[in-house]
Amino acid sequence: MAGGDPVESGLQETYAAGCATLGRTVRAELPGDRSITGEAVAIDGDGRLVLATEDGVQEPVGAGDIVHLRPA
């Protein structure tokens, strides 16, 4: 058994394969009037969406509203 591990159980891979947000540019509107814009590149082991920002930082987002942005 996987013991609840999302990687070992295959849940993380299955979710990522069906996630329409991965690969898209998004804005995460976070608590405290903070926002992050970047490409949604992964779902981490804790279920957070990982954004790659223009600064080259990979920022995990655990709570917030995700807005899909149109290409410029």
Image: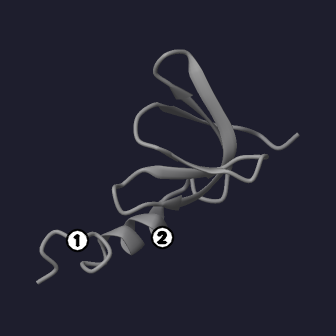
- Sort mark 1 into few (<14), some (14-19) or many (20+) by Cα contacts within 10 Å: few
Q: Amino acid at mark 2?
A: Ala
Q: Is residue 57 above or below residue 12?
A: above
Residue extending farthest to the bottom is 1
Residue bearing the label numbered 1:
5
Q: How many marks?
A: 2
Q: Is residue 43 left or right of residue 41?
A: left
Q: Position of residue 61 (x, y in %)?
A: 48, 42
Callout 2: SS? helix
* Type of the residue with mark 1: Asp
Report x, y in % for residue 68.
Answer: 64, 39
Given this view, does label 2 or label 1 mark the residue nearer the observer? 1
Q: Position of residue 35 (x, y in %)?
A: 61, 27
Secondary structure, mark 1, is loop
Q: Image height check: is 58 above or below 38?
A: below
x 61%, y 49%: residue? 51
Location of the N terminus by quadrant is bottom left
**Residue beneath the point at 82% across and 44% down:** 71
Q: Residues within 10 Å of mark 2 (few under 14, many from 20)?
A: few
Q: Which residue is found at the position 46% from the left and 66% from the top? A: 16
Q: Residue 11 sits in which quadrant?
A: bottom left
As rendered, which of 20 and 22 lies closer to the eye?
A: 22
Residue 17's label in the rendered image is: 2
Q: Position of residue 54 (x, y in %)?
A: 79, 46
Q: Using the numbered discs, state the Cα–Cα distance from disc 2 to disc 1 in whole angstroms.
A: 17 Å
Looking at the image, which residue is at 16% across and 79% down? 2
Where is the C terminus found, in terms of image quarters?
top right
Q: In this view of the protein, can residue 34 be seen by the observer?
A: yes
